């Protein structure tokens, strides 16, 4: 496997509070890399660091994050965020039609051909497992979709600009089991073309979909490994305590 993202001795601070402490991680291309851990473990902060959404006043970082061997701080922010897409816990569709939600990014890239846009929209909606549900209502408002459909629409919107990495921060939070299953099914197919980083508080979800799991606690990376190791014979007692529910 080729390395997609390399994180080396990465520390992150908000003012005087250290949120991440010496993180070292290797994320391979075309895998689902799941990050688990209790609240305030630094999981979201790590995602936001990868595509430089953490560049805020009174914050600072130490260490390096590389995308395909290149320091992310040397990549133009707009280019970086096209290459590394982000899906948040709460879906935020644009107040526009379903079609225009997905076509928004490609139009910003300068694509004007309606035929080309239609192809992109269909391909993206199919990849997000939403096409069959909305193909006859593309001119409807995206705000009329259910929560699970809106989340898959946001995935399609991210895919439409052809990212290389798709980061997801609790994408199934608050969704019903059927919507969650559809997103998980989509992820298994998407990893053939994309590298996926999934933050989830649902350990069963991580066990179902992840190729590699990282357990974070209080800003530290405790251990990484395949699901069969993390869930049955973790090296660190703190991991076992979290997995078994003795820590939450």
Image: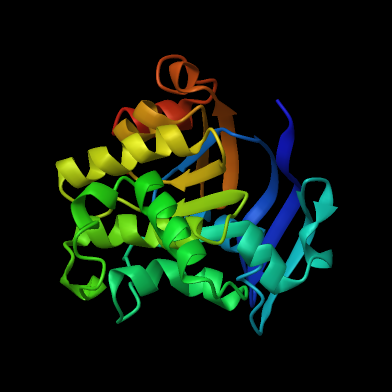
| 74 lies left or right of 119 | right
Residue 169: in sight, yes or no?
no
* Colour theme: rainbow
Between 149 and 180, the residue placed more toward the observer is 149
Q: Is residue 189 above or below residue 11?
A: above
Between 134 and 178, the residue placed more toward the observer is 134
| 201 lies left or right of 160 | left
Quadrant of image for the C terminus: top left
| 215 lies left or right of 206 | right
Residue 58: in sight, yes or no?
yes
Query: Which residue shows up at 24% across the image and 56% down it?
Result: 135
Number of callouts in the render?
0
Quadrant of image for the N terminus: top right
Between 238 and 202, the residue placed more toward the observer is 202
Query: Which residue shows up at 47% across the image and 58% down it?
Result: 120
| 244 lies left or right of 160 | left
């Amino acid at each position: 496997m080729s390395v997609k993202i390399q994180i080396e001795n990465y520390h992150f601070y908000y003012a005087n509070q250290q949120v991440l402490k010496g993180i070292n991680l290797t994320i391979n291309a075309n895998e689902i890399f799941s990050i688990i851990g209790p609240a305030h473990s630094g999981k979201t902060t790590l995602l936001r660091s990868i595509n430089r959404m953490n560049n805020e006043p009174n914050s600072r970082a130490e260490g390096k994050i590389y995308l395909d061997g290149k320091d992310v701080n040397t990549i133009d922010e707009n280019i970086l965020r096209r290459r590394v897409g982000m899906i948040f816990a709460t879906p935020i569709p644009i107040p526009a039609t379903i079609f225009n939600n997905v076509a928004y990014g490609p139009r910003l890239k300068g694509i004007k051909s309606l035929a080309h846009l239609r192809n992109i929209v269909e391909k993206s909606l199919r990849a997000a497992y939403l096409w069959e549900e909305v193909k006859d209502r593309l001119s409807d408002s995206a705000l009329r979709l259910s929560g699970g459909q809106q989340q898959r629409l946001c995935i399609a919107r991210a895919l439409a600009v052809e990212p290389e990495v798709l980061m997801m921060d609790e994408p199934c939070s608050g969704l019903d089991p059927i919507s969650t299953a559809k997103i998980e099914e989509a992820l298994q197919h998407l990893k053939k073309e994309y590298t996926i980083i999934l933050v989830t508080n649902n350990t069963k979800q991580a066990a179902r979909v992840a190729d590699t799991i990282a357990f974070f606690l209080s800003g530290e990376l405790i251990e990484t490994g395949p699901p069969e190791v993390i869930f049955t014979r973790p090296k660190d007692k703190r991991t076992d305590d979290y997995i078994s529910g003795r820590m939450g």
